[in-house]
Amino acid sequence: MRFVWAVAAFVLATVMIGAGIAQRTIFEGPKTETAAISVKDEAPYILIDGAVLNQMPGTQTLRAQAEGDLFASYGRTADMEDWLADAAYNHVSLGKDGKIETTLVEAETTAAPAEGDAASDDAATDPGAGDAAGDVAGGDAAPAEGADAATATGRNPAGSDLWLDEYAQKDLLIAPLQLPAGMSVLVAADGTAPAPSKVTVTWPLQTSTPWAGPLIVGGAILMAVGVFLYILGIRHVRRRRGPRRKGLPLPVTEPIDISKLDDDDKGVISNQASSRRAVAGSRRAFAALPIVAVSALLFTGCSADAWPQFGTTPTPSPSASVIAPEGQQAPAVTKAQAERIMTRIAATVADADAALDGDLAETRLSGAALAARDTNYKLRSAIADYKAPDPILAKPLSVILPQAYDDWPRSVIVVGADEESKTSSIMVMSQQDPWSDYRVSYIANLEASTTLPNLAPTYIGAAQVEPDSPFLSLAPQDVAAAYADIIDKGEQSEYYGLFEADGDQLRTSIAADRDRRLADFNQTANNTTASLTFAASAGTQPPFALQTVESGAIVAVNIDETDTATPTNPDAVIKLDNSPTVKALAAADQSATGFLTTFSDQVFFYVPGPGSNEKIRLLGYSSAILEAKVIS
């Protein structure tokens, strides 16, 4: 009977294990779902809505196939539509019936600025002024100059600062994605050639087999029971049969006296006994080995989805987070996007610094930052040992405060650090329109003891403060003039009580520098032959401000310091024997009318709200000579 039960256990175990394995193989079903995107009309771009990508749960895998270079990027849907506003593209969306639809969107024509237009004239006169003015205005941006030409010849989307991430491959592009709502994907070749026509989106399917594990494990246990029953059956049969015949008589033996055996004989007996025990033990281990091996093999093949899930899956409790104010718009950049943009800016500016290329620097700098760089390039081309400007600190970014704004221009305040020199820089970078790259307009060094105010997290951003805002202790447009008045008048200034004096290294350094230069000037001149005067005023670059958590603002301003050296005797002249920088910029070594030298300060302040007991606090600054000229 034991044999019957053993055979039944073997058969049932085989069926159970086979059924479990079949669930994980031939009966498992497809693991992915793929949707093909059909494109009827050729266009250089394909825009795939986030609804198409999220019509099924799980991660998405985008595949595009065509000959040559292929490109894909993703970002906010509104941003991508703005970038494609002047181009023809195929728009892939999800219809009301849940089917994927493709619509050809024609390019919108934009009128080019009229010749002699005031805005065009201003931009031609001051390339950085447009950026700075746009930062403050915060209004709608017109398409970039040359946008119509880009539509006709094609605009390559690769490398745009607008994308949250991008992919570039050849012949076959595979991009793993997991996009939330409100995001879209752009697919293209190079902006000129038609976009690839073979595009698919693949999602993973949840193919759980909850009974595969129990069947396989139960079958293994049942097989072990069958083996046990089979062994018991064999043992029972042997006992029932007994000996078939009597054994032959054995000769009488006497006990062996082990003490009379030599060492070699003892070793033989001992070795024979131990070898018999080892053989017996190895047979038992060999018999147990298949069962253990099979069980281990079966258990390793069962993943979590091969078992039934009882009860509900616990969901993590949300952690405390900062909530964006009602109606606030999306932040201009993400953390990863800001780091990538700053890395590009740092690389381009480093190349421009090495080549003394102002045109290259202008592609990534604007406003006061560009003006200071241009002057440095002029001096370095004329003076061999003139110091190069400090590099842009791109990584790591310890602070990223993007403007919360859906339109253009949009700006970001970042703080970069250099771990080796233990220095930090605070910068403002701005993007004028969807087609433009971000450019840095303000750069200042942070003091080691500087404590920044509480700022909103990167994923929320901050609202821009208008230049004439009354909701600060001092409007941003008045900060530069007020601080310049303190530089000139000190404690006699009406604004002295608004600014924190402790820790203000800029005022201290300006005062010490003026005393030094006046002393040097008086060594070769006196009040009877020449005079040297100093004055500070608000610079030409408009301020920029972003709100802090305590309703204050970080304000970036530009201050000009002007030195005027004039002769007081009609027979005297001002010579520049000890001023190679002024001589190089003014293109003269002496003048009977004098020289006017301007230094530019890029300064960051924390300006508290009107009800705060805090004073306006200096955060960081940088100073550089801007220009020098002969007084006409």
Image (cartoon, helix red, strand yellow):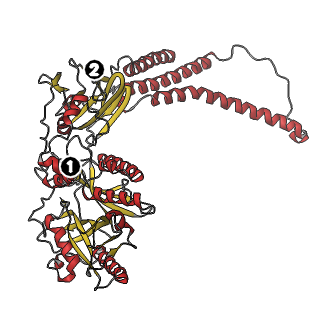
Name the spot of residue 135 as percent of width and height, x first. 18, 53
Q: Are marks 1 and 2 in contact (CB under 8 Å)?
A: no
Residue 28, given in percent of the width and then of the height, sits at: 35, 20
Q: Nearer the viewer, residue 540 or 440?
A: 540
The residue type indicated by label 2 comes to: Ser
Residue at the left extreme of this rendering: 470
Q: Residue furthest front?
A: 571
| Secondary structure category for the residue under label 2 | loop
Q: Position of residue 15 (x, y in %)?
A: 42, 16
Q: Is disc 2 surrounded by few (<14), some (14 to 19) or many (20+) residues within 10 Å?
A: many
Q: Crowding near pointer 1: few (<14 within 10 Å), some, many (20+)?
A: few
Placement of 465 over or under 211, stated as above or below: below
On residue 124, the disc is 1
**Quarter of image, res 379:** bottom left
Which residue is identified by label 2? 197
**In this view of the protein, which residue sits in the foreground, 285 or 4?**
285
Q: Looking at the image, which residue is at 45% across and 63% down?
A: 385
Q: Amino acid at mark 1?
A: Ala
Q: Is residue 172 above or below residue 522?
A: above
